[in-house]
Amino acid sequence: MSASFAIKLDSSINGISKAVELILKGELVAFPTETVYGLGAMASNETAVAKIFKTKNRPDFNPLISHYSNIDAIKLDVEFNLLASKLAEKFWPGPLTLVLNKTPNSRISGLASANLSTAAVRIPSHPIAIALLEQVKLPVVAPSANPSTRVSPVSAEHVERLLGDKSIYILDGGSSQIGLESTVIDLSTGHPRLLRYGGTNLSAIESVIGPIEIANEFSDIRSPGMMLKHYSPLCPLRLDYQNPKPGEALIAFGPGPIPEGFAAVINISPSSNLDEAASNLFAALHRLEAQNASGIAVMPIPTEGIGLAINDRLIRAAKL
Ligand code: TXA
Ligand code: MG
Protein backbone atom coordinates (compact mmCIF):
# COMPACT_ATOMS: atom_id res chain seq x y z
CA MET A 1 0.00 0.00 0.00
CA SER A 2 1.39 3.42 -0.82
CA ALA A 3 1.46 6.39 1.51
CA SER A 4 -1.25 9.04 1.20
CA PHE A 5 1.18 11.73 2.33
CA ALA A 6 4.95 12.13 2.47
CA ILE A 7 6.74 9.77 4.87
CA LYS A 8 10.27 10.50 6.07
CA LEU A 9 13.06 7.93 6.22
CA ASP A 10 16.30 8.52 8.08
CA SER A 11 19.61 8.01 6.30
CA SER A 12 20.77 5.06 8.43
CA ILE A 13 21.70 1.82 6.66
CA ASN A 14 18.13 0.66 7.36
CA GLY A 15 16.62 3.87 6.02
CA ILE A 16 18.62 3.56 2.81
CA SER A 17 17.69 -0.14 2.41
CA LYS A 18 14.03 0.77 2.83
CA ALA A 19 14.40 3.51 0.19
CA VAL A 20 15.99 0.99 -2.21
CA GLU A 21 13.15 -1.47 -1.64
CA LEU A 22 10.55 1.25 -2.26
CA ILE A 23 12.17 2.44 -5.49
CA LEU A 24 12.33 -1.16 -6.76
CA LYS A 25 8.61 -1.49 -5.95
CA GLY A 26 7.84 1.55 -8.14
CA GLU A 27 7.39 4.12 -5.36
CA LEU A 28 8.75 7.67 -5.41
CA VAL A 29 11.57 8.46 -2.99
CA ALA A 30 13.05 11.94 -2.62
CA PHE A 31 16.75 11.70 -1.79
CA PRO A 32 19.64 14.11 -1.25
CA THR A 33 22.22 14.87 -3.90
CA GLU A 34 25.06 17.37 -3.67
CA THR A 35 23.10 19.78 -5.90
CA VAL A 36 19.45 19.63 -4.78
CA TYR A 37 17.05 16.93 -3.55
CA GLY A 38 15.80 14.69 -6.36
CA LEU A 39 12.48 12.86 -6.58
CA GLY A 40 13.65 9.35 -7.44
CA ALA A 41 11.95 6.54 -9.33
CA MET A 42 13.02 3.55 -11.40
CA ALA A 43 13.85 4.90 -14.87
CA SER A 44 12.70 1.69 -16.56
CA ASN A 45 9.29 1.60 -14.89
CA GLU A 46 6.81 3.66 -16.95
CA THR A 47 4.19 3.64 -14.20
CA ALA A 48 6.65 5.00 -11.65
CA VAL A 49 7.94 7.60 -14.11
CA ALA A 50 4.37 8.68 -14.90
CA LYS A 51 3.83 9.24 -11.15
CA ILE A 52 6.80 11.63 -11.13
CA PHE A 53 5.30 13.80 -13.88
CA LYS A 54 1.95 13.81 -12.09
CA THR A 55 3.38 14.52 -8.63
CA LYS A 56 5.44 17.45 -9.92
CA ASN A 57 2.77 18.62 -12.36
CA ARG A 58 5.58 18.54 -14.91
CA PRO A 59 4.83 18.79 -18.63
CA ASP A 60 5.57 15.43 -20.23
CA PHE A 61 7.76 17.00 -22.92
CA ASN A 62 10.36 17.88 -20.26
CA PRO A 63 12.71 14.86 -19.98
CA LEU A 64 14.31 13.57 -16.76
CA ILE A 65 17.91 12.90 -15.73
CA SER A 66 18.86 9.29 -14.97
CA HIS A 67 21.23 8.82 -12.03
CA TYR A 68 23.90 6.10 -11.66
CA SER A 69 26.68 5.05 -9.34
CA ASN A 70 29.10 4.04 -12.12
CA ILE A 71 29.97 4.63 -15.79
CA ASP A 72 29.72 0.98 -16.91
CA ALA A 73 26.00 1.03 -16.09
CA ILE A 74 25.56 4.33 -17.96
CA LYS A 75 27.08 2.79 -21.10
CA LEU A 76 24.23 0.26 -21.25
CA ASP A 77 21.73 3.09 -21.69
CA VAL A 78 23.46 5.84 -23.70
CA GLU A 79 26.20 5.90 -26.34
CA PHE A 80 29.35 7.22 -24.70
CA ASN A 81 31.74 9.21 -26.90
CA LEU A 82 35.20 10.73 -26.55
CA LEU A 83 34.03 14.09 -25.21
CA ALA A 84 31.76 12.33 -22.72
CA SER A 85 34.68 10.20 -21.52
CA LYS A 86 36.84 13.27 -21.01
CA LEU A 87 34.18 15.12 -19.03
CA ALA A 88 33.21 12.03 -17.04
CA GLU A 89 36.79 11.44 -16.03
CA LYS A 90 37.24 15.00 -14.85
CA PHE A 91 33.85 15.83 -13.29
CA TRP A 92 32.10 12.61 -12.15
CA PRO A 93 30.91 12.01 -9.57
CA GLY A 94 29.65 15.58 -9.42
CA PRO A 95 27.22 18.27 -10.59
CA LEU A 96 27.42 17.63 -14.34
CA THR A 97 24.73 16.07 -16.55
CA LEU A 98 25.47 14.80 -20.06
CA VAL A 99 22.84 14.42 -22.79
CA LEU A 100 23.78 11.52 -25.10
CA ASN A 101 22.08 9.30 -27.67
CA LYS A 102 20.16 6.39 -26.20
CA THR A 103 21.38 2.86 -26.98
CA PRO A 104 18.98 0.51 -28.82
CA ASN A 105 18.40 -1.46 -25.60
CA SER A 106 18.42 1.50 -23.24
CA ARG A 107 16.64 0.77 -19.97
CA ILE A 108 15.53 4.40 -19.72
CA SER A 109 11.82 4.42 -20.53
CA GLY A 110 10.48 6.52 -23.37
CA LEU A 111 8.43 8.57 -20.94
CA ALA A 112 11.54 9.41 -18.88
CA SER A 113 13.32 10.80 -21.94
CA ALA A 114 10.14 12.45 -23.33
CA ASN A 115 10.35 10.13 -26.34
CA LEU A 116 13.54 11.79 -27.55
CA SER A 117 16.36 9.75 -29.03
CA THR A 118 18.63 11.23 -26.35
CA ALA A 119 18.75 10.91 -22.58
CA ALA A 120 20.41 12.86 -19.75
CA VAL A 121 22.67 11.00 -17.30
CA ARG A 122 24.80 11.83 -14.28
CA ILE A 123 26.69 10.34 -11.34
CA PRO A 124 26.01 12.42 -8.22
CA SER A 125 28.69 12.72 -5.53
CA HIS A 126 26.50 12.74 -2.41
CA PRO A 127 27.40 9.64 -0.33
CA ILE A 128 23.74 8.84 0.45
CA ALA A 129 22.79 9.14 -3.23
CA ILE A 130 25.69 6.87 -4.18
CA ALA A 131 24.78 4.29 -1.50
CA LEU A 132 21.18 4.28 -2.74
CA LEU A 133 22.15 3.98 -6.42
CA GLU A 134 24.70 1.21 -5.73
CA GLN A 135 21.99 -0.85 -4.10
CA VAL A 136 19.22 -0.14 -6.61
CA LYS A 137 21.61 -1.26 -9.40
CA LEU A 138 19.30 0.26 -12.02
CA PRO A 139 19.05 3.80 -13.42
CA VAL A 140 17.05 6.13 -11.17
CA VAL A 141 15.37 9.18 -12.67
CA ALA A 142 15.35 12.14 -10.31
CA PRO A 143 14.08 15.57 -11.22
CA SER A 144 14.36 18.20 -8.51
CA ALA A 145 11.78 17.32 -5.82
CA ASN A 146 9.57 20.40 -6.26
CA PRO A 147 6.34 21.12 -8.11
CA SER A 148 7.14 22.42 -11.62
CA THR A 149 8.09 26.15 -11.69
CA ARG A 150 8.80 26.31 -7.89
CA VAL A 151 12.16 26.66 -6.12
CA SER A 152 14.14 23.39 -5.87
CA PRO A 153 14.56 21.88 -2.39
CA VAL A 154 17.96 21.69 -0.71
CA SER A 155 16.80 19.92 2.47
CA ALA A 156 14.31 17.22 3.46
CA GLU A 157 12.23 19.92 5.19
CA HIS A 158 11.92 21.81 1.90
CA VAL A 159 10.70 18.65 0.15
CA GLU A 160 8.15 18.16 2.90
CA ARG A 161 6.94 21.75 2.54
CA LEU A 162 6.67 21.44 -1.26
CA LEU A 163 5.35 17.89 -1.68
CA GLY A 164 4.19 16.93 1.83
CA ASP A 165 0.67 16.17 0.62
CA LYS A 166 1.85 13.72 -2.05
CA SER A 167 2.34 9.95 -1.85
CA ILE A 168 6.11 9.99 -1.63
CA TYR A 169 8.90 9.00 0.76
CA ILE A 170 11.68 11.40 1.77
CA LEU A 171 15.15 10.13 2.63
CA ASP A 172 16.55 12.77 4.97
CA GLY A 173 20.26 13.40 4.39
CA GLY A 174 20.67 16.97 5.62
CA SER A 175 21.41 19.92 3.35
CA SER A 176 22.58 19.73 -0.26
CA GLN A 177 25.96 21.42 -0.32
CA ILE A 178 26.14 22.97 -3.77
CA GLY A 179 22.58 24.26 -3.63
CA LEU A 180 21.92 24.61 -7.39
CA GLU A 181 21.21 21.95 -10.01
CA SER A 182 23.84 20.27 -12.19
CA THR A 183 25.21 21.85 -15.35
CA VAL A 184 23.62 20.19 -18.41
CA ILE A 185 25.74 19.68 -21.56
CA ASP A 186 24.39 18.19 -24.78
CA LEU A 187 26.99 15.88 -26.33
CA SER A 188 24.57 14.02 -28.59
CA THR A 189 25.73 15.79 -31.74
CA GLY A 190 29.19 16.70 -33.02
CA HIS A 191 29.18 20.04 -31.29
CA PRO A 192 28.71 20.39 -27.55
CA ARG A 193 26.10 22.78 -26.23
CA LEU A 194 25.34 24.11 -22.79
CA LEU A 195 21.65 23.50 -21.99
CA ARG A 196 21.69 24.68 -18.36
CA TYR A 197 24.16 26.58 -16.20
CA GLY A 198 24.79 24.77 -12.92
CA GLY A 199 27.15 23.47 -10.30
CA THR A 200 30.07 22.75 -12.64
CA ASN A 201 31.58 25.93 -14.05
CA LEU A 202 31.40 26.39 -17.81
CA SER A 203 35.01 27.60 -17.95
CA ALA A 204 36.21 24.40 -16.26
CA ILE A 205 34.27 22.31 -18.81
CA GLU A 206 35.64 24.37 -21.71
CA SER A 207 39.16 23.84 -20.44
CA VAL A 208 38.65 20.10 -21.00
CA ILE A 209 36.72 19.98 -24.31
CA GLY A 210 37.09 23.45 -25.82
CA PRO A 211 34.49 26.14 -26.51
CA ILE A 212 30.82 25.29 -26.04
CA GLU A 213 27.85 26.92 -27.72
CA ILE A 214 25.27 28.25 -25.26
CA ALA A 215 21.74 27.17 -26.19
CA ASN A 216 18.87 29.53 -25.51
CA GLU A 217 15.08 29.43 -25.62
CA PHE A 218 15.12 30.48 -29.22
CA SER A 219 17.82 28.18 -30.57
CA ASP A 220 16.37 25.06 -28.95
CA ILE A 221 12.88 24.80 -27.53
CA ARG A 222 13.59 21.13 -26.85
CA SER A 223 15.82 21.95 -23.88
CA PRO A 224 12.99 22.66 -21.48
CA GLY A 225 15.36 23.62 -18.63
CA MET A 226 15.59 26.80 -20.65
CA MET A 227 11.86 27.40 -20.19
CA LEU A 228 11.53 30.91 -18.94
CA LYS A 229 9.54 30.78 -15.71
CA HIS A 230 11.18 28.39 -13.29
CA TYR A 231 12.68 28.33 -9.81
CA SER A 232 10.05 30.85 -8.69
CA PRO A 233 8.98 31.65 -5.14
CA LEU A 234 5.25 32.23 -4.63
CA CYS A 235 5.78 36.00 -4.24
CA PRO A 236 7.23 38.33 -6.89
CA LEU A 237 11.04 38.50 -7.10
CA ARG A 238 12.95 41.44 -8.58
CA LEU A 239 16.59 41.91 -9.49
CA ASP A 240 17.07 45.32 -7.97
CA TYR A 241 16.63 46.71 -4.49
CA GLN A 242 15.76 50.37 -4.80
CA ASN A 243 12.64 51.69 -3.03
CA PRO A 244 11.63 48.74 -0.79
CA LYS A 245 7.95 47.85 -0.95
CA PRO A 246 5.79 47.11 2.12
CA GLY A 247 6.53 43.62 3.47
CA GLU A 248 9.31 43.07 0.94
CA ALA A 249 12.38 41.02 1.92
CA LEU A 250 15.97 41.48 0.71
CA ILE A 251 18.49 38.87 -0.37
CA ALA A 252 21.80 40.63 0.24
CA PHE A 253 25.28 39.76 -1.04
CA GLY A 254 28.66 41.08 0.03
CA PRO A 255 30.07 43.07 2.95
CA GLY A 256 28.55 46.44 2.04
CA PRO A 257 25.98 48.28 4.15
CA ILE A 258 22.53 46.64 4.09
CA PRO A 259 19.97 48.94 2.47
CA GLU A 260 17.26 50.01 4.89
CA GLY A 261 13.50 49.57 4.77
CA PHE A 262 13.15 45.81 4.10
CA ALA A 263 10.89 43.62 6.26
CA ALA A 264 13.58 40.88 6.41
CA VAL A 265 17.15 40.49 5.19
CA ILE A 266 19.15 37.34 4.43
CA ASN A 267 22.76 37.86 3.34
CA ILE A 268 23.67 34.78 1.29
CA SER A 269 27.40 35.60 1.43
CA PRO A 270 28.69 38.50 3.51
CA SER A 271 32.22 37.73 2.24
CA SER A 272 31.13 37.78 -1.46
CA ASN A 273 31.93 34.08 -1.89
CA LEU A 274 29.93 32.80 -4.88
CA ASP A 275 30.00 29.12 -3.84
CA GLU A 276 28.58 30.12 -0.46
CA ALA A 277 25.95 32.27 -2.17
CA ALA A 278 24.91 29.36 -4.43
CA SER A 279 24.73 27.07 -1.43
CA ASN A 280 22.46 29.50 0.47
CA LEU A 281 20.27 30.92 -2.31
CA PHE A 282 17.44 28.36 -2.56
CA ALA A 283 17.31 27.93 1.23
CA ALA A 284 16.91 31.72 1.54
CA LEU A 285 14.10 31.73 -1.04
CA HIS A 286 12.32 28.90 0.80
CA ARG A 287 12.67 30.69 4.14
CA LEU A 288 11.31 33.99 2.80
CA GLU A 289 8.49 32.20 1.00
CA ALA A 290 7.55 30.40 4.24
CA GLN A 291 7.59 33.74 6.09
CA ASN A 292 5.04 35.07 3.57
CA ALA A 293 7.24 37.91 2.33
CA SER A 294 5.16 40.10 0.01
CA GLY A 295 8.06 40.19 -2.42
CA ILE A 296 11.80 39.51 -2.65
CA ALA A 297 14.42 42.00 -3.88
CA VAL A 298 17.89 40.72 -4.74
CA MET A 299 21.18 42.63 -4.71
CA PRO A 300 23.45 42.18 -7.76
CA ILE A 301 25.58 39.03 -7.84
CA PRO A 302 28.66 38.87 -10.12
CA THR A 303 28.19 36.91 -13.36
CA GLU A 304 31.35 34.83 -13.15
CA GLY A 305 31.95 31.17 -12.19
CA ILE A 306 28.92 29.71 -10.42
CA GLY A 307 27.57 33.29 -10.37
CA LEU A 308 26.41 32.57 -13.95
CA ALA A 309 24.18 29.77 -12.64
CA ILE A 310 22.97 31.93 -9.74
CA ASN A 311 21.98 34.73 -12.12
CA ASP A 312 20.36 32.26 -14.53
CA ARG A 313 18.11 30.97 -11.71
CA LEU A 314 17.33 34.49 -10.48
CA ILE A 315 16.38 35.75 -13.95
CA ARG A 316 13.95 32.85 -14.37
CA ALA A 317 12.64 33.26 -10.82
CA ALA A 318 11.89 36.92 -11.64
CA LYS A 319 9.76 36.12 -14.73
CA LEU A 320 6.08 36.73 -14.27
O1 TXA B 1 21.24 18.62 -10.13
C1 TXA B 1 20.38 18.07 -10.83
O2 TXA B 1 20.51 17.88 -12.03
C2 TXA B 1 19.10 17.59 -10.10
C3 TXA B 1 19.50 16.46 -9.14
C4 TXA B 1 18.34 15.87 -8.43
O3 TXA B 1 20.25 15.50 -9.82
N1 TXA B 1 18.10 17.17 -11.03
C5 TXA B 1 17.46 18.07 -11.83
O4 TXA B 1 16.50 17.51 -12.66
O5 TXA B 1 17.71 19.26 -11.82
P1 TXA B 1 15.39 18.37 -13.41
O6 TXA B 1 14.46 17.36 -13.96
O7 TXA B 1 14.85 19.38 -12.49
O8 TXA B 1 16.17 19.01 -14.60
C6 TXA B 1 16.58 18.22 -15.71
C7 TXA B 1 17.07 19.09 -16.82
C8 TXA B 1 15.93 19.81 -17.47
O9 TXA B 1 16.37 21.11 -17.81
C9 TXA B 1 15.67 18.98 -18.72
O10 TXA B 1 15.07 19.71 -19.74
C10 TXA B 1 17.08 18.57 -19.09
O11 TXA B 1 17.68 18.29 -17.84
N2 TXA B 1 17.10 17.34 -19.91
C11 TXA B 1 16.87 16.06 -19.50
N3 TXA B 1 16.93 15.20 -20.54
C12 TXA B 1 17.22 15.93 -21.63
C13 TXA B 1 17.40 15.61 -23.02
N4 TXA B 1 17.32 14.37 -23.48
N5 TXA B 1 17.66 16.65 -23.87
C14 TXA B 1 17.75 17.93 -23.40
N6 TXA B 1 17.59 18.28 -22.10
C15 TXA B 1 17.32 17.30 -21.23
MG1 MG C 1 14.03 21.15 -11.68
Image: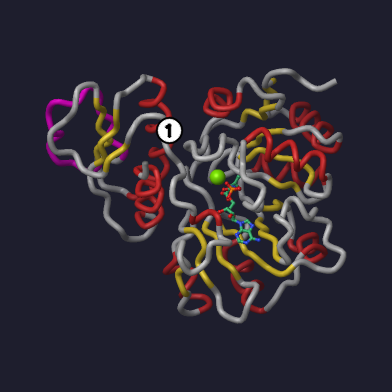
Say if 213 sits above or below 246 in the image: below
Q: Which type of secondary structure does the marked residue at label 1 adopt?
A: helix
Disc 1: which residue: 283
Percent of width and height locating residue 92 = 62, 60
- Name the image quarter holding the C terminus: top left
* Residue appearing at x 52%, y 63% in the figure: 195
Mark 1 Cα within 10 Å, few/some/many (few <14, many 20+)? Answer: many
Q: Quadrant of residue 190?
A: bottom right
Is residue 92 inside the magenta stretch? no
Give coordinates of residue 316: x percent, y percent: 40, 48
How many numbered circles does the render carry?
1
Image side of residue 316 versus residue 12, left or right: left
Q: Mark 1 CB in 8 Å range of ligand 1?
A: no
Q: Quadrant of residue 232?
A: top left
Which color mode does the image show? secondary structure
Tell me which amino acid carries mark 1: Ala
Camera-nearest residue between 134 and 301? 301
Residue 277, image quadrant: top left
Answer with left or right where residue 271 lies relative to residue 154: left
Q: Is residue 292 left or right of residue 195?
A: left
Residue 200 horizontal side relative to residue 60, left or right: left
Q: Is residue 308 above or below residue 104?
A: above
In x, y percent, where is residue 69? Answer: 73, 52
Residue 269 placed where, x, y %? 29, 41
Residues rendered magenta in the picture: 253-268
Q: Main secondary structure of the magenta part?
A: loop
Give the position of the N terminus as an image quadrant. Answer: top right
Q: Which of these two is toward me, 121 or 274?
A: 121
- Residue 267 magenta-highlighted: yes
Q: Is residue 242 above or below residue 226?
A: above
